Amino acid sequence: MIVGVDGSPDSTSAVRWAATTAAARDLPLRIVHVIDFSPTGYAGAPYIESAKVFEWAEEDGRVMLSDAVAVARAVAPDLTIETSLVPAGGSHWFVEQSGRARMIVLGASGSGRIGQALLGSTPVVVASHGRCPVVVVRGDAPDATAPVVVGVDGSAVSERAVAAAFEEAALREVPLVAVHVWSDVKVGTFSGIDRAEFLDPRAFEESEQVLLAERLSGYCERYPDVVVHREVYLDGPRAHLQAWSEKAQLVVVGSRGRGGFTGLLLGSTSNGLIRDAQCPVMVVRPESA
């Protein structure tokens, strides 16, 4: 498991989350700081000795890594930890490493001493292109008894998200809430329409519940101890998952689907949750990505 740090409070939360998760699964943790001058304005400035700036940034990075190890040890004393100071690459480095990692964990945003946010856009890029699950963490540790929530739309990438969510719920010994939204349009899109003209609420609920149950059935058999709650909504996937993030310890979504039960638009939904969710968000992408 890999966790990126930049010295910000959110990256510290990411280290705690990653260390706790890695220890529970007997996985080693690699703590990484990437030195990235691109957002600072230092690179290429004619009046600055770039070698000295690099030395200062390198030392700053070592301090961040040392601090992060102390944070990880505080929550998982016996965890196997290694650290890496990466000279350049930012989000591209994490994407490249994602092909060999079990999971990548990042803070929702951050700003190191060098200047602007070093991890500010990194979570979106890595979640959009990473080949392993990417978890974006913000704020304090979530309630360990809260459920895992997963967005389900019936697409191939949603299938992977469901598999990951069941595994997370089983390992954490908590319930799983499966959220299915019939349409990917915003909440309220149908509010000005007489729904009775095109939608029988009872038939809709029954039909979508059946489809959702079919999507979950194989995993329910594989994880018989996981209690599953099914929630069906007409529209607004981002709004409903955002609301559930306030009651969850983890929200799991796929990325890059397409409309309706055959592929909810989880690209924009996942990006929105990364920015606004009230708990860690795991983004899972297609195997071929």
Image (cartoon, grey):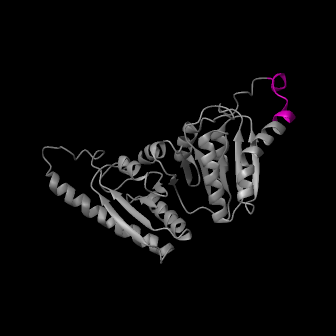
Compared to residue 205, the image places residue 250 above or below, namely below
Magenta region's main secondary structure?
Answer: helix
84 to the left or right of 215: left
Depth check: 250 or 247 in front?
A: 250
Q: Which residue is drawn at 47% across and 73% down?
A: 79
Residue at the spot 71% in from the left edge and 42% down from the top edge: 180
Point out residue 119 in the picture as x, y percentages from the top left corner: 40, 50
Residue drawn at 44 percent across, 70 percent down: 71
Q: Is residue 57 visible?
A: yes
Q: Position of residue 171 (x, y in %)?
A: 63, 64
* Highlighted magenta segment, given as a residue range: 194-204
Q: Between 262 and 275, which is closer to the camera in this rendering?
A: 262
- Counting from the top left corner in percent of width and height, residue 52 is at 16, 57
- In the image, residue 282 sits, relative to residue 73, either above or below, namely above
- Quadrant hosting residue 28: bottom left
Q: In this view, does 30 lie to the left or right of 52?
A: right
Q: Can residue 110 be seen in this view?
A: no
Which sits in the foreground, 277 or 201?
201
| Residue 280 in picture, x, y percent from top left | 56, 55
Q: Does the magenta stretch include residue 201?
A: yes
Q: In this view, does 31 lie above or below 80?
A: above
